[in-house]
C-alpha cells in the first residue's frame, strides 16, 4: 500500500500520518518520534482518533519495514503495570518468533514473584 493512501479511513490525522511515514522511511530520522496534542483544545482530546492513529502507524511499520510491532494499551489500567507490559511483550514475541524461548525472562519473573510474596530469596539473586 503506497504511503499516500494511508489517510483513508479517518479524517483529521493526515498531518501525523505523513510525519510518521516520512520518519519511518528516512534513514536520517531520529530514533524517537512522538505526537503531541498541546495545540488542541483540552475538551477535544477524547474521541479524535489517537488510538486509530497509533494502530495505523503500527500497520504502516509492519507493512513498510516488515517490523515486529507490539501494541500496549495504556488506557487500560491493568496494562500500565510494568510486569504486565513485560509479559505482554514476551507473549507477542513468542507468537511472532515461536522458536524463541524466554528462559531468562521466565526465571527472573519467577524470582520477582517469589520476592513479592516474601519468600526467602536474596535481592542479589534477582539482579543476575
Image (cartoon, helix red, strand yellow):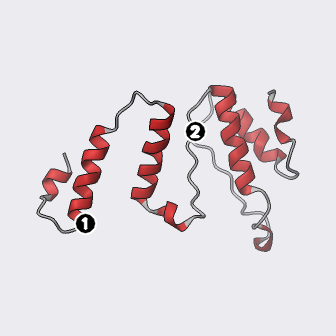
Q: Residues within 10 Å of mark 1 (few under 14, many from 20)?
A: few
Label 2, label 1: how far apart the Cα atoms are = 30 Å
Q: Quadrant of the N terminus?
A: top right
Residue 94 position by quadrant:
top left
Q: Residues within 10 Å of mark 2 (few under 14, many from 20)?
A: some
Q: Secondary structure at mark 2?
A: loop
Q: From the top left corner, tell me how far across and down residue 103 is, in percent.
A: 29, 38
Side of 18 where 28 appears, left or right? left
In percent of the image, x 42 and y 43: which residue is there?
90
Q: Which residue is mark 2?
A: 69
Along the polypeptide, which appears first: circle 2 or circle 1? 2
In percent of the image, x 64 and y 49: which residue is there?
34
Check the image and name the residue furthest to the bottom.
43
In percent of the image, x 62 and y 28: which residue is there?
28
Q: Quadrant of the C terminus?
A: top left
Q: Which residue is mark 1?
A: 116
Q: From the top left corner, tell me how far across and down residue 97 is, in percent.
A: 46, 30
Side of 86 where 32 appears, left or right? right
Q: Is residue 26 visible?
A: no
Side of 33 where 103 appears, left or right? left
35 or 108, which lies in front? 108
Residue 84 position by quadrant:
bottom left
In percent of the image, x 18 and y 68: which residue is there?
118
Residue 8 position by quadrant:
top right
Q: Is residue 48 above or below residue 88?
A: below
Q: From the top left corner, tell me how far across and down residue 76 is, in percent.
A: 57, 64
Q: Is residue 56 visible?
A: yes
Amino acid at each position: 500500500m503506497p504511503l499516500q493512501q494511508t489517510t483513508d479511513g479517518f479524517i483529521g490525522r493526515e498531518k501525523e500520518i505523513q510525519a510518521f511515514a516520512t520518519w519511518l522511511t528516512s534513514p536520517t530520522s531520529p530514533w524517537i518520534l512522538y505526537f503531541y496534542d498541546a495545540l488542541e483544545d483540552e475538551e477535544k482530546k477524547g474521541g479524535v482518533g489517537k488510538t486509530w492513529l497509533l494502530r495505523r502507524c503500527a500497520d504502516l511499520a509492519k507493512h513498510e519495514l516488515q517490523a515486529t510491532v507490539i501494541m500496549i494499551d495504556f488506557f487500560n489500567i491493568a496494562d500500565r503495570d510494568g510486569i504486565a507490559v513485560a509479559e505482554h511483550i514476551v507473549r507477542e514475541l513468542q507468537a511472532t518468533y515461536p522458536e524463541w524461548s524466554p528462559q531468562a525472562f521466565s526465571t527472573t519473573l519467577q524470582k520477582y514473584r517469589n520476592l513479592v510474596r516474601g519468600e526467602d530469596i536474596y535481592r542479589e539473586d534477582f539482579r543476575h
